[in-house]
Image (spheres, rainbow, N blue to C red):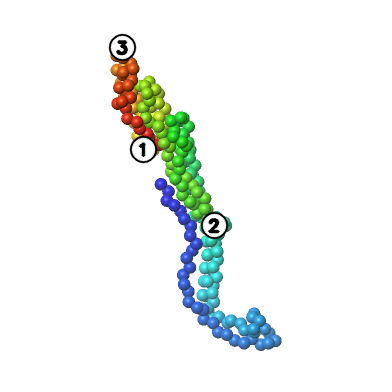
Amino acid sequence: MVESIKNFPNMMPATGAADVSVYKTPTENPGKHANGYELSLTDEGWKILDEKSEQKEKKASGKKEAAGEGELNEEEQRKVDELEKIDKKVKVHEQAHVSAAGGYARGGANYNYVTGPDGKRYASGGHVNLDTSPEKTPEATIRKADVIRKAALAPADPSPADRQIAADAAKMAQNAQRELAARQTESGNSNASSSSYNQRQAVGSGQL
């Protein structure tokens, strides 16, 4: 399962004050400030100001990325590309279950989502709830078990849970077939046999 990828603005380290010396500019050649004063920085002072300028640019860039604006860096784009592939694969997988299950699917597919570096949500996993309870007659149960088994194995890459549901459906069909054979040997007592069958079968549900 893909973990949540969150993007936070860069945290800024604390810096010390710059070394500054102040001198008065001649009136005939006024400086940068209206009060006639300029700041003359030492080498260390210029270094600190350059660092602060870079930090401000990074912070502004981080805010844009967190808001889904601006361009992603190479690593973030790689993560987005990966999430897009996973999203597509998950949705194709679950839709295959839904399409094959027909009326035995309890609602549509359910998805788990993660948020990518671009602020968008991507499906990272999912499941489909199936009605796997036996029907009123062995014949109907056999037909239902066949649909459930095919629905469980419908995706190109069935998961271990999908294969388990398919195995359970095969067992349900076998039990129903044995019950049907027993009914056929009991002439004139089909209603009693069908009632006995319903009492022995447990109501269940499966999740693909």
- On the question of residue 177 being in view, the answer is no
Q: Residues within 10 Å of mark 1 (few under 14, many from 20)?
A: few
Q: Earlier in the sequence, mark 3 or mark 2?
A: 2
Q: Position of residue 122 (x, y in %)?
A: 49, 47
Is there a contact, CB below 8 Å, between mark 3 and mark 1? no
Task: Report the disc number at residue 67.
Answer: 2
User: Could you tell me how far apart the alpha carbons at marks 3 and 2 are, in whole angstroms?
Assistant: 74 Å
Q: Residue lying furthest top in this view? A: 187
* Viewer-proximal residue among 61 and 195: 195
Quadrant assignment, res 205:
top left
User: Could you tell me how far apart the alpha carbons at marks 3 and 1 are, in whole angstroms?
Assistant: 42 Å
Is residue 188 shown above or below 85? above
In the picture of the structure, the residue carrying the numbered disc 1 is 160
- On the question of residue 121 being in view, the answer is yes
- Which one is closest to the eye, mark 3 or mark 1? 3
Name the residue at 48% across, 74% down.
15
* Viewer-proximal residue among 165 and 28: 165
Q: Amino acid at mark 2?
A: Ala
Name the residue at 70% across, 86% down.
28
Task: Report the disc number at residue 187.
Answer: 3
Q: Earlier in the sequence, mark 1 or mark 2?
A: 2
Q: Position of residue 130 (x, y in %)?
A: 41, 33
User: Could you tell me how far apart the alpha carbons at marks 1 and 2 are, in whole angstroms?
Assistant: 39 Å
